[in-house]
Image (spheres, helix red, strand yellow):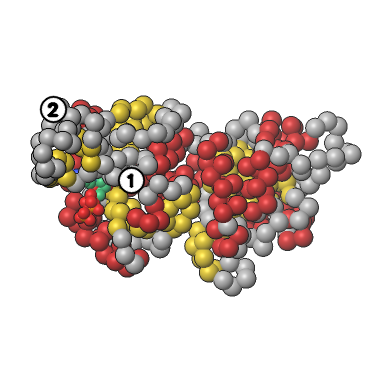
Amino acid sequence: MSEHRHVVALAVTGSVAAYKAVEVARLLVKAGHRVLPLMTSSATRFVGPVTLSGICGQPVATDMWDPTYPGELHVAIADRADVVAIVPATADLIARLAQGRADDLVTATALCAKGPVLVAPAMHPRMWSHPATQRNVADLAKLGRVRMVGPVVGPVASGDVGMGRMEEPSAIAGAIEELLRGTAGDLTGKRIVVTAGPTFEPIDPVRFLGNRSSGKMGFSLAARAAARGAEVILVAGPVALATPAGVERRDVETAEQMRATLAGLLGPDQTGADALVMAAAVADFRPASASATKIKKDAGEPPPIGLARNPDLIAEIAGKRSGKRPILVAFALETGADEQVIAYATKKLAHKKVDLIVANAAHESLGRDENRVALVDGVGASPFLAGDKDVLADRILDRVASLLGS
Ligand code: CTP
């Protein structure tokens, strides 16, 4: 038998989906990896340790205090493992990971991991969408130390259908392979420009026309793209947000300034980036002429503000691109029922000639930490996904990564 290619610590926690972890183990072993199996005590109620140890050819570790092991078992496993994969991960496990707890062998090993940690959540959709779980998932995303795979929309053990079903074993094994190849960043080597926030269009030196965009969605996208290995340039309108780690930031105020900054970054043939994600709420109109001096209230009748149309920045870039780069992602912020939001977004996709539209409803998005979006491309619209903007950013970037073929 040749050397094992890599070592994967496969930790199973207590969910009905635990039986699928056996298939993940089988795929990893088949690919030539050594798999060190771990189980929480509740996982052993769902699947027999003998099954897992039989597949892996290794004893299953379940107990931090294993008296037969000389030393600290979690440190020994973490030292050997190139990747720690938690498959399936329950809501409780995710909560403990988010808190940095180490109260059993699985969480202690994850906390001690020297390399990437992969988490494949599985739970009832109501548990997944519960604000506490979403907060925990968002906290993990912020820490940037865990790669989430799934969950996906589908039937769960109870027979209910929704977001919470564990990703398929083949996809989980594929994601583990990616991590093992050292491509934790599936966006490594990609240059991604993200715009965020509102634009302020001056009326006079102290007044402006603006909008209620907080910039949170764009900042989340920039943070997550950087965590996934991309070189990220964030073109930010006036917002009160800190620059995410590893992101290069360019501040602008007006649509015209954003246009000039993007032109500089993309270059005349638009190929200066692999992807452009326009999360900014660029003002459609600006005051036709800004007063050079402050307009005084006692200078007669209130002056009318004539408006001029701003250029549509992303449509302009789409018009100039000759090949498939950069991948163009626009947002559609609409009011109305879901079907109407999708219909407007589908129209916008064709009109702006972009690759993907992130459709969201204004009342569920503006200024909030969470959002609810549907992804609309040339093939159709995804179901609406709800969650923290950090988590949704990853789902949007999954699509960008697949459009980039990475
Ligand atoms: N956008 C842009 N340049 C503009 C306006 C918008 O690039 N001048 C981008 C935004 O960053 C966003 C998308 O286009 O990605 C939003 O499309 P837009 O046509 O502005 O949507 P609405 O303003 O909602 O359009 P409408 O008023 O037609 O509903």
Dot 1: what SS? loop
Q: Nearer the viewer, residue 29 or 283?
A: 283
Q: Earlier in the sequence, mark 2 or mark 1?
A: 1
* Mark 1 Cα-neighbour bin, 10 Å: few <14, some 14–19, many ≥20: few
Instruction: Name the quarter where the C terminus is drawn.
Output: top left
Instruction: Name the quarter where the N terminus is drawn.
Output: top right
Q: Position of residue 280 (x, y in %)?
A: 30, 42
Q: Nearer the viewer, residue 401 or 287?
A: 287
Using residue 335 as the reference point, say whether residue 316 is left or right of it. left
Q: Is mark 2 within 8 Å of ligand 1?
A: no
Residue furthest right in the image: 67
* Mark 2 Cα-neighbour bin, 10 Å: few <14, some 14–19, many ≥20: few
Dot 2: what SS? loop
- Residue 292 lies, with reference to residue 288, above or below; the image says above
Q: Position of residue 250 (x, y in %)?
A: 31, 27
Q: Label 2 amino acid?
A: Ala
Give residue 223's quadrant in the image: top left
The residue where tag 1 is placed is 212
Count how many numbered circles sit on residues in the image. Answer: 2
Whether residue 398 is visible, yes or no, is: no
Q: Position of residue 293 (x, y in %)?
A: 15, 27
- Label 2 and label 1: CA atoms lie apart by 25 Å
Using residue 70 as the reference point, say whether residue 17 is left or right of it. left
Give residue 206's quadrant in the image: top left
Q: Position of residue 342 (x, y in %)?
A: 30, 63
Q: Residue at x 85, y 36 (%)?
A: 69
Q: Residue at x 78, y 35 (%)?
A: 73
Residue 292 marker = 2
Using residue 292 as the reference point, say whether residue 403 is left or right of it. right
